C-alpha cells in the first residue's frame, strides 16, 4: 500500500485515539488513527451479540463499510467469578433503567455489583476484565483478539482515575485498584492494552 495507512478506531472517546496511535507505533506500524468524530454520519451499532468478540466484530464491520477504511473496534466488560461471569457483555448497563435514572450509570453499576457480593468472602471475590479487539478491512478480511486482566473485587471503592468498575478492581500482584493507577500504568497491564497490542501485531500482516 502506498502512503501512510489510515485506520479508523470505532470510538467517540478522544482519549482512546492517542493510546491506539502509540500502541501501533510501538509495534512498528506507521498508520494514522482517526476516531468517529471525523465521521459524524457513522452508524450507531447496537451490541446485540452474546460475547465480546461478536460485538467488536459487529462494530468494526459497520465502520469499515461506512468509511471504506480499515476499522478497529473493541468491546469490553467485567466478569465476576461469584456471578458466573456476569455482568459480562451487560457491564455497561448492569443496573438497567435504574442506572440511567440516577444520571451516573457507572456508580449505579458498581453499587449493584457490590451489593450482590456483600456476603461473598475474600477468597471468592475473583474477577477479570476482558476486552475483544477486532479489525475489519474494506475487502472483508477480518480478525479478532482478546486481552484479559485477572484480579479481585474489594468492598469499598478507592481511587479517582479510570472509569466504570475501576474503583473496586485490584489486579493480581497489586495492592492498588486500577482507579489508583495512572493511565500509563493501567494500559501496561490492562485487558484493553493487551488486546490492542495483540491486534497491532495482526495489523502488520494485514495492511
Ligand atoms: P464498552 O467496551 O464501552 O462496551 O464497555 C463496557 C463496560 O465495561 C464499561 O461501561 C465499564 O462498565 C466496563 N469496563 C470495561 N473496561 C473497563 C475498565 O478498564 N475499567 C472499568 N470498567 C470497565
Image (cartoon, rainbow, N blue to C red):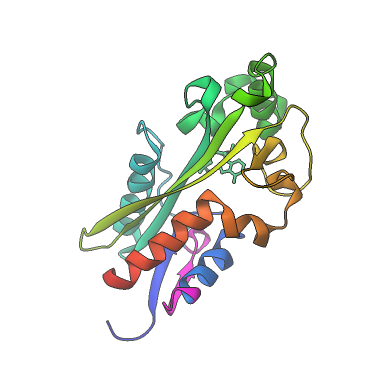
In this view of the protein, can residue 99 be seen by the observer? no
In x, y percent, where is residue 94? 56, 25
In x, y percent, where is residue 98? 64, 20
Residue 107 is inside the magenta segment: no
Q: In front here: 205 or 100?
A: 205
Q: In this rendering, is residue 146 above or below 170?
A: below
Image side of residue 97 versus residue 88, left or right: right
Image side of residue 197 versus residue 207, left or right: right
Magenta segment, which residues?
26-38
Image side of residue 8 versus residue 205, left or right: right
Q: In this rendering, is residue 194 above or below 6?
A: above
In x, y percent, where is residue 2? 29, 86
Q: In this rendering, is residue 134 above or below 101?
A: below
Q: In which quarter of the image is residue 142?
A: bottom left
Q: Quadrant of residue 30?
A: bottom left
In x, y percent, where is residue 141? 22, 60
- Which image quadrant: the C terminus? bottom left
| Residue at the spot 57% in from the left edge and 64% down from the top edge | 19
Image side of residue 171 versus residue 26, left or right: right
Residue 27 is inside the magenta segment: yes
Amino acid at each position: 500500500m502506498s502512503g501512510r495507512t489510515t485506520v479508523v478506531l470505532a470510538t467517540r472517546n478522544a482519549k482512546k485515539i492517542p493510546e491506539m496511535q502509540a500502541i501501533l507505533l510501538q509495534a512498528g506500524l506507521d498508520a494514522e488513527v482517526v476516531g468517529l468524530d471525523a465521521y459524524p454520519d457513522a452508524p450507531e451499532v447496537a451490541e446485540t451479540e452474546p460475547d465480546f468478540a461478536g460485538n467488536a466484530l459487529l462494530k468494526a464491520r459497520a465502520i469499515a463499510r461506512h468509511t471504506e477504511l480499515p476499522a478497529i473496534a473493541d468491546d469490553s466488560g467485567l466478569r465476576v467469578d461469584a456471578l458466573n461471569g456476569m455482568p459480562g457483555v451487560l457491564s455497561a448497563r448492569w443496573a438497567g433503567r435504574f442506572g440511567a435514572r440516577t444520571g451516573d450509570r457507572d456508580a449505579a453499576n458498581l453499587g449493584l455489583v457490590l451489593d450482590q457480593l456483600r456476603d461473598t468472602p475474600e477468597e471468592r471475590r475473583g474477577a477479570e476484565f476482558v476486552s475483544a479487539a477486532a479489525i475489519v478491512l474494506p475487502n472483508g478480511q477480518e480478525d479478532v483478539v482478546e486481552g484479559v486482566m485477572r484480579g479481585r473485587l474489594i468492598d469499598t471503592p478507592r481511587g479517582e482515575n479510570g472509569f466504570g468498575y475501576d474503583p473496586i478492581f485490584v489486579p493480581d500482584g497489586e495492592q492498588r485498584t486500577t482507579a489508583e493507577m495512572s493511565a500509563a500504568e493501567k494500559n501496561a497491564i490492562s485487558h484493553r492494552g493487551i488486546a490492542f497490542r495483540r491486534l497491532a501485531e495482526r495489523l502488520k500482516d494485514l495492511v
